[in-house]
Amino acid sequence: MKENYKIPLFIRFIEIAAFSLTILVWGSVSLAAEIIATHNLQIELVPTEMRLIGRDDITIKTEGTGVLTFRVSENLTQIKIIVDQDQRDFEFNNGRLLLNLKPHEQTADLHIRIYYSGIFDDPVPVRPVNTDNPGYGVTGTISPKGTFLLAGAGWYPELVGSQATYRVTVRAPAGFIAVTAGRSRGHITQNDQTVSTWEVNYPVRGLALSAARYVVEEKSVGKVKAATYLLPQNKHLAASYLEATAGYIALYSDLFGSYPFQKFAVVENFFPTGFGFPSYTLIGGTVLRLPFIVHTSLGHEIAHCWWGNGVYVDYAEGNWSEGLTSYVADYLFKEMKSEKAALDARRQWLKDFSTLVRPDNDLALNQFQSRYNPATKTIGYDKGAMIFHMIRRLVGEEAFWGSLRDLFRDRLFQRTSWSDLQRAFEIRGKQSLQYFFDQWVYRTGAPRFSVDVVSTERSGNSWQITGKITQDRPFYNFSLTLALETGQQTITEKINVNDQMTIFELTCADPPLKLTADPAVDIFRRLSPSEIPPAVNALKSSSSVVTVLSDQLDPALEKAARTLVLSLGLNHNEFITEDELNRQMLVENDILMIGGLRYPDLLKHLPVGVDIRPNSFSLDKSVYDKPSDAFFGVFNHPFAENRIISLFMPLSSEYADIVAAKITHYGKYSYLAFQSGKNQAKGFWPVEKSPLVYEWKQ
Ligand SMILES: [Zn+2]
């Protein structure tokens, strides 16, 4: 079973990780000098009480600091602070623990011991419905099923403004193995307790902790350990994850430089999330079992160990790490597969950007922090990736990969900005990239341009063609490939485009047939509406939808209609009956029809090969007429330009609710057919016309 709809489900989980990372990094951005601290953490987990009992021995170089501030959970109790044998008073409010230092302590190597206890009982989601809008906000939970503690949960005293290293010892009931960042110092079970020890000797931005009844497997990759921490029911997945992890570590070590951590672990979470941390990833079991995760998301998470978790992001100047990671993982895997797969990926980025991003929700890349909806995803990940693609074409293969190696060597564990990246590419590329970064990174939007032929003249056996590229404002400067097809050959030529109009001339030795600008989709641009067949994403990003319930609708389908609206994240939606639909409503909104309607006029823009009847539908000669069949399609609006009409038509209520929850995961598709709740067909309506293609009339 290979159901692609689950990919976005997983990727969306990862975005929460990026989000929480953002918060962590922001917390310490404003502090200039960092205090050096070493923690020796002793943690005891009491899952039956959802409790953690902690002791932290901290050694601090105070460097003239008068007050130490620790970030902890506001629910901590039984806090006791000891400095050099003396129990000390402290302030504790809003999750901040403040300790005043005596004058002689302010320039010393100080030893502080903090005792504390805390309940961590955030409710754990089982199956989220709307997967594009994260925010179920679990940061810490301790239970007999497992323990999940993000850095933001405040499960240990994090010294604000410090650069810290850690030794973490976790005691838990026998069989509960704990995992965190850094190097494992093993786990032993004695006296009904399992003790896991970890050492983190590089500066981390906050530490997360997981524990459960894991089965641990390891494999050496040079000096690095690949490891899996899986629950018993999934332990059979270990071999494929270990092998894939080893492969990715080898691939990226070759490309960028040695892996910066001692291990990479795939850790199973006991509820459905996915997080990327320095040196490990935490993924829910249902996602781990999907066969394609090893080929997609795992590589993305491992690439983050170089970009984001290795070379840190300076969030003040925007998050470049998702664009770069998407490019060197998700995209590179497509490129390794085939040229066509890579081209399709680039075209999809352009389609998504053109559909989902409008002036009112656009951001320049230097303002992107993390994804929290489809528009921010397509800006930060897709446009970001396309920027790296264009840099690679501009400076060439050697300079591109060489710059990334330089950057990794020089900026490991340092906050790094778009300007640092620009400098690295400029040095290796031996050219100024200021105009490039100005237009692509520091500006919102994308160019719009078209190709036209002004004249075609024959003299003897040669054809002279004069053409022009016309741009809308604001104008971009880029190198554009033109492909001229004749009956005999295809001639390609590069021109430099800037300003409103760029004139070019081409010559060929036989009659020209077709001229295509940017045939390989190498330039980021806003597609014209004629290049984007309507798709699910257009509905998801709609500013106003009217959902029309058919007059003959089986009442059981109303529930499915509500599930559909919820899972698509339609915030501006109104439910009406077919009787309530009037002309004004129709033309002023995007329409979502549930069930077959009385007015066939509404679907007058049905593409060739599609037929919709009351109790059946057909797509490309395949007829669907069983009660367990369901159709979903998005079409051009019958009466309003730039609006869409969509139809959700389950032939009975049998699997309707299941299908309704799945549709949102097929954002890029124009049509979907389901049988017994499973996707059977999906596709796009054909593109009618492109402003980058000129064809000579025969
Ligand atoms: Zn990512």
Image: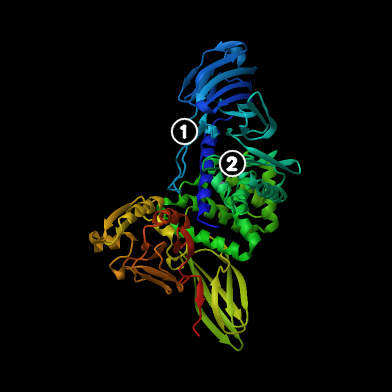
Q: Nearer the viewer, residue 696 or 655?
A: 655
User: Is residue 499 toward the left or the right of residue 262 in the image?
Assistant: left
Regarding residue 52, the answer to whether it shows in the image is yes
Q: Amino acid at mark 1?
A: Asp
Instruction: Give coordinates of residue 13: x percent, y percent.
Output: 51, 45
The colour scheme used here is rainbow
Q: Name the residue located 51 percent from the left edge and 32 percent from the top edge.
A: 141
Q: Name the residue located 66 percent from the left edge and 35 percent from the top edge.
A: 182
Q: Name the residue located 47 percent from the left edge and 33 percent from the top edge.
A: 122
User: Is residue 321 toward the left or the right of residue 627 in the image?
Assistant: right
Look at mark 2 in the image and give the residue it sits on: 268
Q: Quadrant of residue 431?
A: bottom right
Q: Quadrant of the N terminus?
A: bottom right
Q: Name the residue located 55 percent from the left edge and 58 percent from the top edge.
A: 2
Q: Amino acid at mark 2?
A: Glu
Question: Of label 1 and label 2, which has the lower sequence position?
Answer: 1
Task: Kindly identify which numbered label has been placed on residue 122.
Answer: 1
